Amino acid sequence: MRGSWAFLLWTVALAWALEAPDALEVRRGGFLSIPVRGEGTLTAEAPEAFLPLTGEVEEEGLLNFLVRPEARAGEYVVRVRDARTSREVRVRVLPEAGLSLKVPPGGTGVEGESLTYTLFLQNTGNAPDRVRLEVRTLLPYRLGSALVDLEPGETKEIVLELRLTGRNRDTATVLAYSGLDPSVRAYGVIETIILPFAGAESLGRHALRYRFGLRLTYGGGSLGYAVALGLSGGLSDYVGLASGLEWGQEGVKGEAFLRGEDFALGFRGYGDYLRLEGEWGPLQAYYAFGAVAPTFGALYQEGSIRLGLALSGLSQRLDLGYTVREGGLALTPYLALRRRTSPEEVRAGGGLEAKLEDRVFSLSGRLEYLGEPVFRLGGATRSQAPWGLKGEVAYQGGLWQGSLEGRATLTEEVGANLTVRAGQGVGGRFGLTFRPLPLPLSLQAGLGYQGGVTADGGFRVRLDGLEVGGGLAYQPQGTSATLYVAYRERDFGVRGGLSLTPTGRTLVLAGEGRLEDLEGSLRLGYDLERRLPEAQGAFLYRLPHGLGLGLSGKYRPGEFSWQALGVVELKGGFNTPEEVVQAFGGRATGYVEGVVFHDRNRDGVRNLDEPPLPGARVRVGAQEVHSDNQGRYRLELYPGTYRLEVGGLEASLALRRQVEVRVERGKAVPLDLPVESVAGLQGQAYLDENRNGQRDEDEPLLPYARVLLRGPEARTALADGRGNFTVGGLLPGRYTLSLDPKSMDRFQEPGEPVVLDLVPGPLPQVYLAARPVVREVVKTLTEESLSVVFEPLPSVLPPGAELPLRVKVQGKPERVVAEFGGKTYPLELLEEGLYGAYLPVEGKGGVEIRVKAFRGEEVAEASAFLPIRPGPLATLSATPALLDPGEEVRLEARLLRRASRVEVRLGPLVVPLERADDLTYWGSLLAPRTPGIYQLELYLDGTLTHTARIRVRE
């Protein structure tokens, strides 16, 4: 009996033992539910990272917690208690990566100088992260750090310095890759405008830019020289000049061209080979001379007829062809007559040229018989990503030759390429490249055949200014290996390398640097097999006014040579003299003229008691004029539609109206400019860490925060990299200022709005605060409230566009409508919780959007403001804009209204674009074979909407 009681007590104790899981995994911002069973009331003690939702349960149930969004990744202990005992539950918050990268929009600098940008990188994840930064630019650059360690929520400043070289514009893309999760990344784009010399931005439309260079060298008892001269720019609205020539011991190099609307005259020099070129309407001709036999060539092409002629002392040739076009196919059969003088012979024949342009690929070929057959066929896919092919095959003189190149992107980190060649011999190579996203590392390997089996492999690691790389190659001639280490800062760099080849082994150490006006380089080499050292070095000292003096030397055992150097370089520009402009055709302009006056009653019409404003600057873009003592101005503009602005006024005056004018050639448009009394403000956005509502000295500023103003009018301002912002041109009155929560990270929220009365006069200083987020649960898990939240809206739209309205609605509404422009539009359910429609944009100035969701008698609504400004209904971008003949041009059209047919036209060529989404279309075409500037036209449903220009190199 006693044994039975003991067993019964043991069973009851076991039944009432505290039960809970040993371990759980959760994500930040999610819910933690711990199933428990025990005796009496069960409670839990949790760390601050878990916000309790269910305080206690009786005997059995779920203890619920909200995992705070700011909870760090790691393991936490939750202690569960009942009436008798306690138990620990280990909870692991899973790591999640998140990055935010803020960059400035760009800047302007002079060639040869450096620009410094400050980037802000933040870890928005919940675990420590090592972030790799990568910069893609064609300019030399220095990044403050390529690997950045960040704690959750931490922000660091990184400095990017660009060395401005000979380009007009550069786009630098900065990418940040998370080391915690390679799929998480952030990027920013920086546009840099590079001026050729200081003050170039002040030159007018007709300006000439010059460059003069002189280099003298003396060494080894001989004197050398080189003279460079360049003069380029606009002589008038109809004629342009582009030249860049250099004279030296090797002859003349460079080119000089004079181009008009229907003519071109030019000269090209390639040392001993010189060439004169001309173009007049459908006629093109050239004359080549120098170290080669003088040759004259001409081509006349009018419509479908083509006539070609080539004359030299050795041969003469005449071609006559006719082109037939059908869609993207062009066929040109032609007859040819050729005469040779040595040996004397005359042959007649003909051939066929064919060209096929398709959206996917292009082909071109020629088949000719003129005593012997000649054949050529080449083609390429229009796009090389994610895969592409390019190849050519030719037959001439009884020999076949061909090549094929292919590439493919297998994954985001792995790419492949294939090259095959055939002709005098057969060869080829298949290669793979591997570039892991979270690491500054790239690997490549290949296997091929070139007179035997070949194999190669290589690697490169680049971290901040340090770079390490090398390679190993096996060929029938033997095995080769290279290894190098380099380090570069802004003003100096060093590099060491070892090269092992079947013909020799060499060790090299080199360096270069710059100290203010002194530049120098030194290279030391050692031949390991012959045990012979060598050294060479040079330095250049730059004097004011473009002068420079230098000395270089080279040493080998038993041999020493040196050379002295003198350099003169001058560059600048000036506006084209008016006499020259008129001599070459003049200007094709019109005029806008009127009076700038103080519009006291704000009616836009000048009254007798409203005074003129002398000295005001009336401008269109970079072009501006000053009003005279009577407030009169006269602005010369080219035909088109322009928006006029007025500057040079007191801070309390501004042109508030949007003034646009259409200018026609040879006509003067009268237009008075009403200036009104206005108010403004300046301020700073900062993080109120202690939430005391005051700006403390140690509290950080908020870079690139967006400021919202609501009052007599609505405005949006963007703070700079230090949190400063300025807003002017406002109507006097009471305004409410607040921070846009969308411009902040997830751990910040806007502080209290600031209300102030603005009057004309000095600009008041305002401080706008953001606060760390404090999370509170105010509703149960099962309650669904009706709410409406806007998706991001366009910053501005033109009349005639369509607004792609998207709103998130929770609470399962019965219907959702939008009130827009005085009309009501029903919104359709696009996906769970997302409603939308395309709304027509009309009017000007701006319009309020109000969205309402209905469920029974309950109504939820939200409103937003959309500015409306005149502008194109679509934009066309062509990349790249500077191309080689026949190079692929990638087209992207971004629409502001939907269209059923989107196409790009280049002369008679029509290229339909493929739809990427409702408002984005893609396509491509091949650049013309003839050098020049071409205009691409974008048509929406047959209507010309936008244009873009491309230029084909010589």
Image (cartoon, rainbow, N blue to C red):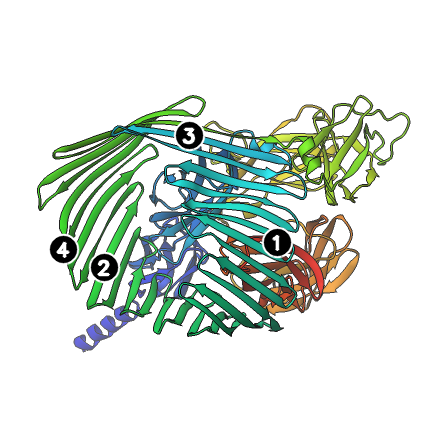
- Tags 4 and 1 touching, CB below 8 Å: no
Q: Nearer the viewer, residue 206 or 724?
A: 206
Residue bearing the label numbered 3: 214
Label 4 neighbour load within 10 Å: few <14, some 14-19, many 20+? few
Vertically, is 669 above or below 550? below
Judging by the rendered image, the residue that carries numbered circle 4 is: 502
- Can residue 191 be seen in this snapshot? no
Q: Earlier in the sequence, mark 2 or mark 1?
A: 2
Q: What residue type is labelled 4?
A: Pro
Q: In this orientation, which residue lies closer to the viewer: 184 or 332?
A: 332
Mark earlier in primary sequence (3, 1): 3
139 left or right of 276 in image: left
Say above or below: 869 vs 491. below
Q: Nearer the viewer, mark 3 or mark 1?
A: 3
State which tag comes first along the sequence, 4 or 2. Answer: 2
Residue at the (31%, 50%) spot, across then down: 440
Tell me the mark number nearer the camera, choosing from 4 and 1: 4
**Residue 721, percent across and down?**
50, 36
